[in-house]
Image (tube, helix red, strand yellow):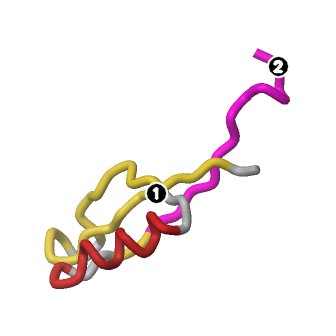
């Protein structure tokens, strides 16, 4: 696959507030971000972190 045909991505990590998870993810989704996974943050399960990606260009 040529370099010009390869999909390029940008990534973001965002903390999620348990009581407002849907609204947070919806607002990032409107901007073209796709949720990859949610993992416990440094503070444990009470502070999850979302990992997102979106195509560049």
Of mark 2 and mark 1, the one earlier in the sequence is 2
Residue 24 in percent (x, y) is at: 35, 77
Q: In this figure, which residue is indicated by the disc labeled 2?
A: 2
Label 1 neighbourhood size at 10 Å, few (<14), some (14-19), many (20+)? many
Residue 14 in percent (x, y) is at: 42, 72
Hey, which residue is sitting farthest front in the picture?
Answer: 30
Residue 50 in percent (x, y) is at: 35, 63
Left/right placement of residue 6 relative to residue 28 reads right
Residue at 44% x, 64% y: name it: 29
Q: What secondary structure prevails in the magenta region?
A: loop
Residue at 18% x, 71% y: name it: 44
Numbered circle sitting on residue 30: none
Left/right placement of residue 30 relative to residue 44 reads right
Q: Secondary structure at mark 1?
A: strand
Residue at 48% x, 68% y: name it: 30
Q: Quadrant of the N terminus?
A: top right
Q: Is residue 50 above or below residue 57?
A: below
Q: Secondary structure at mark 2?
A: loop
Q: Nearer the viewer, residue 35 or 30?
A: 30
In magenta stretch: residue 30: no
Label 2 neighbourhood size at 10 Å, few (<14), some (14-19), many (20+)? few
Q: Is residue 33 above or below residue 48?
A: above
The magenta segment is: 1-13
Hey, which residue is sitting farthest top in the picture?
Answer: 1
Numbered circle sitting on residue 52: 1
Residue 25 in percent (x, y) is at: 35, 69
Q: Is residue 45 above or below residue 36?
A: below
Residue at 82% x, 19% y: name it: 2
């Amino acid at each position: 696959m040529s370099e010009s045909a390869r999909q390029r991505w940008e990534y973001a990590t965002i903390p999620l507030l348990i009581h407002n998870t849907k609204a947070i993810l919806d607002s990032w989704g409107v901007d073209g971000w796709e949720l990859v996974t949610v993992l416990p943050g440094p503070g444990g399960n009470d502070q999850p972190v979302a990992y997102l990606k979106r195509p560049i260009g």
